[in-house]
Amino acid sequence: MIGRLHGIVAEVGEEEALIDVGGVGYVVRCGARTLSRLPEVGGETVLQVESHWGEQTGLTLYGFLGRDERRAFVVLRTIQGVGPKAALAVLDVLPPAELAAACARDDRAAVARAQGVGPKLAQRIVAELKGKPITDGPVTAFAPPTAATPAAPSATGEAVAALMGLGVAEPQARRVVEQASLRLGDEAEPGALIKAALQELGR
């Protein structure tokens, strides 16, 4: 099985990237956060890869820019009801350290922000991951949030996550949400921000 790819970014799509390694192109499925952080086409990259073999789908490669992300993906996949798409969606809204912290404080709402993850599945994820070593980082990643890291996601954070769930790359999602926030003010609700951000995208 393939565990790592070091090559050139040949193409970037909505859900996958094509990585050229010595003239061989590997199609790698990635989350929106990973795709948005890849170099431009022609740039060099290293992806940590989790390989899966299915009788109907054959070999599928899932790519990550860090070992923690790959490890979190593997742990998420051990939970009943969490398929590859849902696991990638969770990591799009909650990087490994944030996922660990959310589970430590029983923050099901944060996990449920992921596209395709309902309240029941979010509750199962939090219950099964609480206390598990999701990352290789220090134990402080599991500590409850301090004043500097509020438990409740901000309105802009929710809006960015919603746009990413619709397939918008993270940098672009953050840019249009910031523009919408400037227009509507700091007190704007997530729904209003999302609507205004979509209008920005359509311009």
Image (tube, rainbow, N blue to C red):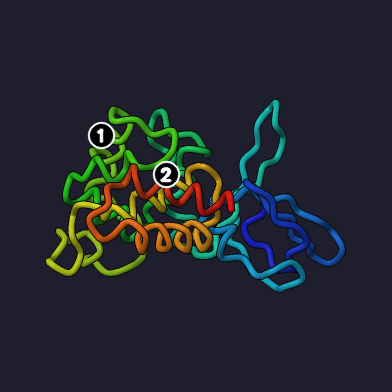
Q: Is residue 129 left or right of residue 164?
A: left
Q: Spatial distance from mark 2 to mark 1, Cα to Cα?
A: 28 Å
Residue nearer the viewer, 186 or 56: 186
Q: Amino acid at mark 1?
A: Gln
Q: Quadrant of residue 77?
A: top left
89 relative to 57, above or below: below
- x and y, in percent, of residue 97 in the image: 32, 61
Residue nearer the viewer, 180 or 165: 180
- Foreground tag (2 vs 1): 2
The answer to whether mark 2 and mark 1 are in CB contact below 8 A is no
| Numbered badge on residue 34 | none
Q: Residue at x 21, y 67 (%)?
A: 140
Q: Residue at x 40, y 63 (%)?
A: 178
Which residue is the site of mark 2?
A: 195
Q: Earlier in the sequence, mark 2 or mark 1?
A: 1
Which residue is the site of mark 1?
A: 123
- Can you name the residue that lies furthest to the right here? 23
Residue nearer the viewer, 198 or 140: 198
Q: Residue at x 18, y 60 (%)?
A: 150
Q: Judge the density around disc 2: few (<14), some (14-19), many (≥20) Cα neighbours within 10 Å.
A: some
139 relative to 13, above or below: below
Q: Amino acid at mark 2?
A: Lys
Secondary structure under the numbered disc 2 in the rendered image: helix
